Structure formats: structure tokens, C-alpha cells
Image (cartoon, grey):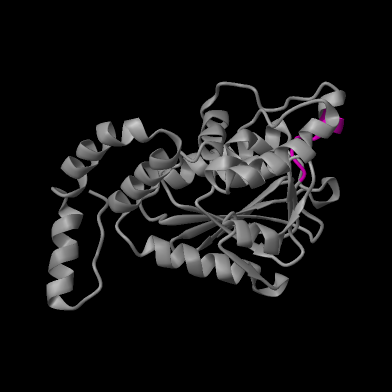
């Protein structure tokens, strides 16, 4: 099933939900309504046990996302600063806290808030024309929406170079630095992201949630790992899925996960 709005396309491919930013004429820049549309789609996906992964991409061939829509902001438009569930779900995504795995398919430039959105994704596939940049310092600002966390994804020297010069890097440079998981031709972009989504989604949901949180914490706040690790051990190692995983291995069949 596919749902199309003025700003977001939501489509299902089996157990994978594909969200497509749909403002190509505005370089898919973020408005308050687009932020809430993304958040609504995330809330829906999180409440559906049949959704195993999310692919996030964008329309057009110029930009994945140019960050905040400055024209809308200058006109007094809403920039997504509310506390409603949809807006909160969007910002959980930017912090990497969406429990469902998220794979980005980057079709063009990811600038400012667009790159900050990508930093919340778990895996990033980019087409060869994609570029990445945090140009805020050139405008008298700084990447205040999570962009300063880029040093958790790439080496510190490169993170400082990107934030302090405001210059863009290519998709290949992003791959070399470890920001990007794969660089492919544009025509293979979504298919490659869907392949990642299906491979990730084939694993147990509780296991994925544990890996996602603990691996991120090991980089951002190692002291919390010691606190969270035994909690996840208690939940995951005593779960029905842990028994199912072992049983399926012994019986040489694909496991049937329940997420509990």
C-alpha cells in the first residue's frame, strides 16, 4: 500500500516501510508539516509488529534534504518545534532512538539538517552524486540539531574539518570515512537500501534494539553501557525469540520472530 501526501510518500515493500521526502522543488527541505508527517509515519511503523525496517529516501535527483526550509522560516512558518507525538517521534529519529532499524538511501545532497537527519539512521547508502555538508559556520551558526555528533560516525579530525570549514564531502569520501555503508549508481540506490533493510529485518527485533542502543552508547556514553547491558541481557536472553533462534538453528529452518 502506498500513501502519498504533498510532502511525504509512504510505501510498504513486504515488511519494510519506505518513506520518501517529497518536496523536490524545494530540495526536500524540512517544514513543520513534513517533520510531523515523518513522525506520524514513524509512530505508525513502531506500532506495527509487521514492520521490521524503514528505508528513508527522497524524491528528485538534486537533494536528499537541504535542511530547514529557510524561506518558510523567514515567512514565519512552523519549523517543527512542538511537543506532539509526531514531532517527538521525528526528533527521536534524529537522535538514533527509533527502535526499528532505519536505512537511508541518499539520492543527492544532504545539507545541514538533512545530514543531521541521516546521523539518526543506522545505515546509509548513497548514490554517486550524493554530497554531505554542515555549512552552518559559514552562516554564523553551528549544527545545533545534532550535527556536532558527526564525530561519533567519522574520525574527529574529519568531523572538525566538516563543521569548521562548512565544506561538502563526496559520497566516496563519506564511504572512506565510514559515514556511508555503500556507494552505488542512482538506479540501484533504493534496491540496495531495501536489500540492507531485509537483511537487517531478518534478525530478531529485540536483538536489533539491543544492538542499536548499546553500540551507539559505546561511542556516545560508554558509562551507560554498564548500566544498560545487564538490562538487555535480562530481556533478550530470556525472551521467546532467544529460544526460537536456538531451536531454528538446531532444526535448520528460518526463525519466526515474535519480538518478545
| Between 84 and 145, the one nearer to me in the picture | 145
**Residue ID at (70%, 73%):** 185
In the rendered structure, the answer to whether residue 119 lies left or right of residue 8 reads left
Residue 57: x and y in percent read 64, 55
**Residue ID at (86%, 24%):** 74
Name, please, the residue furthest toward the front: 157
Residue 76: x and y in percent read 83, 21
**Residue ID at (78%, 50%):** 168
In the image, residue 67 lies in the stretch drawn in magenta? yes
| Between 60 and 225, the one nearer to me in the picture | 225
In the rendered structure, the answer to whether residue 258 lies left or right of residue 41 reads left
Magenta span: 66-72
Asked if residue 14 shows in the view, the reply is no
Is 83 situated above or below 60?
above
| Between 123 and 191, the one nearer to me in the picture | 123
In the image, residue 25 lies in the stretch drawn in magenta? no
**Residue ID at (37%, 35%):** 222
| Between 255 and 156, the one nearer to me in the picture | 156
Residue 166: x and y in percent read 78, 40
Residue 5: x and y in percent read 69, 47
Is 140 situated above or below 58?
above
Amino acid at each position: 500500500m502506498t500513501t502519498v501526501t504533498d510532502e511525504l510518500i509512504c510505501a510498504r515493500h513486504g515488511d519494510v516501510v519506505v518513506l520518501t521526502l517529497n518536496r523536490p522543488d524545494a530540495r526536500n527541505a524540512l517544514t513543520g508539516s513534513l517533520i510531523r508527517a515523518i513522525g506520524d509515519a514513524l509512530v505508525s511503523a513502531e506500532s506495527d509488529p509487521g514492520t521490521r525496517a524503514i528505508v528513508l529516501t527522497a524524491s528528485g535527483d538534486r537533494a536528499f534534504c537541504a535542511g530547514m526550509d529557510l524561506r518558510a522560516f523567514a515567512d514565519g512558518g512552523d519549523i517543527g518545534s512542538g511537543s506532539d507525538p509526531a514531532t517527538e517521534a521525528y526528533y527521536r529519529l534524529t537522535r538514533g532512538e527509533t527502535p526499528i532499524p532505519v536505512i537511508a538511501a541518499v539520492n543527492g545532497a544532504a545539507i545541514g539538517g538533512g545530514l543531521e537527519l541521516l546521523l539518526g539512521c543506522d545505515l546509509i547508502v548513497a548514490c554517486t552524486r550524493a554530497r554531505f555538508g554542515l555549512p552552518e559556520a559559514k552562516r554564523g551558526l553551528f549544527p545545533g540539531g545534532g550535527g556536532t555528533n558527526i564525530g561519533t560516525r567519522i574520525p574527529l579530525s574529519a568531523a572538525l574539518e566538516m563543521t569548521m570549514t562548512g565544506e561538502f564531502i563526496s559520497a566516496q569520501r563519506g564511504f572512506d570515512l565510514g559515514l556511508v555503508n555503500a556507494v552505488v549508481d542512482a538506479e540501484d540506490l533504493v534496491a540496495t537500501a531495501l536489500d540492507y533493510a531485509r537483511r537487517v529485518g531478518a534478525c530478531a527485533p529485540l536483538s536489533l534494539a539491543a544492538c542499536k542502543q548499546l553500540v551507539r552508547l559505546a561511542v556516545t556514553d560508554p558509562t551507560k553501557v554498564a548500566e544498560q547491558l545487564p538490562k538487555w541481557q535480562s530481556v533478550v536472553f530470556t525472551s521467546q525469540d532467544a529460544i526460537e533462534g536456538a531451536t531454528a538453528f538446531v532444526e535448520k529452518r528460518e526463525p519466526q520472530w515474535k519480538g518478545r
